[in-house]
Amino acid sequence: MKRALIAAVALAALVPGAAQAQQAQPTPELQALDDALPGTLINDPSRMDWNFYGTDQTTRNVKDPAIPGGGAAVQVTVARAGANIYDSGANVPIRTGIVAGRDYTVAFYARTLKSEAADGKGRIGVRFQQNAAPYPGFGDQTLEVGSDWALYEVTTRADKAIPAGQAIVGLQLAGAKQVIEIGQAIIVEGATSIRTVKRVETAAAPDPELPPQLKDKGRMLNDPANRDWGIYGEGQTTKPTVTNVYGRVGTLFSVSAAGSAPHVSGASIALNNGIKEGDILTIAVLARTLSAATPDGHGLLSVRIQKNAAPYDGFLDKQVKVGPNWRLYQFRTQSGMDIAEGTAQLTLHTGAARQEIEIGPVYVIREEPVLVPAN
């Protein structure tokens, strides 16, 4: 499927003039590709007029329907291995800046025609980098490329920010005397592989089962698959995401500055049932932090059960530190009030810090009493 998707944007490939005016808005073809890929597409795969550098390499464009991923490639001949793998190569432009703490993936098809490396394989060094001295970067990895076309991916989490207009993926090619072909490149933000298919393409598939920690806990009071949340608060933006955890979808909350209180921004999630005083509830939130302006880099998330109208009476009010890896955060509480059906909600408060928190499924469960047979 990915091969066909890349082919849809191959019309401008290998046309130098088409790349001189990079569009501020994606074309319909690029938007369709972005919609199908996990994460956010941050380059133009149809552009192959990359910045090639190094005195010991030559390039030529190759077009052939048999080339996977769009029928286009660049053939690179490296006359001799360099003292450093980066002595020759190509820079693939990124249309946006790099945000520290986010996941980035670059993927491309490649094959080796000739190589004087001991194993006969080609060498491609991959590095996300700032295209300005002293050229800081991250994610360095050297790929060993075989003789058959194959899809190669490099995934990394950014440990530094790079401003827009200076972010590139460097393909370093001086690791061997070689002739290598590289197809169109796809670079995405917020995903660890382009092989994951977005939910819109698998809408008919059943949702994954509950996390095992929540099985047989009681009665579900909300619909974890319903992402129609009430988002609120100035200085906060949200974006849907695709994940590889339970539910397969999430929401990225980006808070530009800490608020006067945690509740100044967040989201409200409607509950399908009322709550009685004395009910025992378990609230579970699947979440991770991408970045946070806190001393330990952990995000700050608060949860509260409340009424959906002023003065928003409620209970629980629990804050938790959210780490960089996906985790199911659980809260157990007892209701101190009645909340009528149709007026109960769970609120997630994100305003405690400047941060980016990705939130997956949310579960609100009322524990049911266990009946013990009378003697």
Image (tube, grey):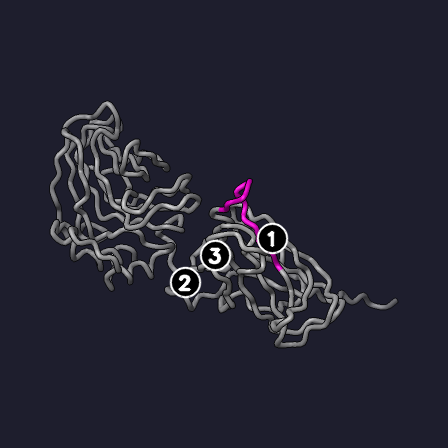
Residue type marked 3: Phe
Secondary structure, mark 3, is strand
Separation of residues labelled 2 and 3 (CA atoms):
19 Å
The picture places residue 148, in percent across and down from the top left corner, at 23, 42
Which stretch did the figure color magenta?
292-303
**Position of 135 compared to 180: left or right?**
right
Q: Residue at x 50, y 60 (%)?
A: 247
Reading the image, the residue beneath label 1 is 329
**Position of 148 compared to 334: left or right?**
left
Q: Residue at x 40, y 51 (%)?
A: 190
Q: Magenta segment: does it hold 302? A: yes
Secondary structure, mark 2, is helix
Quadrant of the image containing the N terminus: bottom left
**Position of 138 compared to 272: left or right?**
left
Residue extending farthest front: 260
Quadrant of the image containing the C terminus: bottom right
**In the image shown, does 328 or 144 lie closer to the viewer?**
328
Q: Magenta segment: does it hold 284? A: no
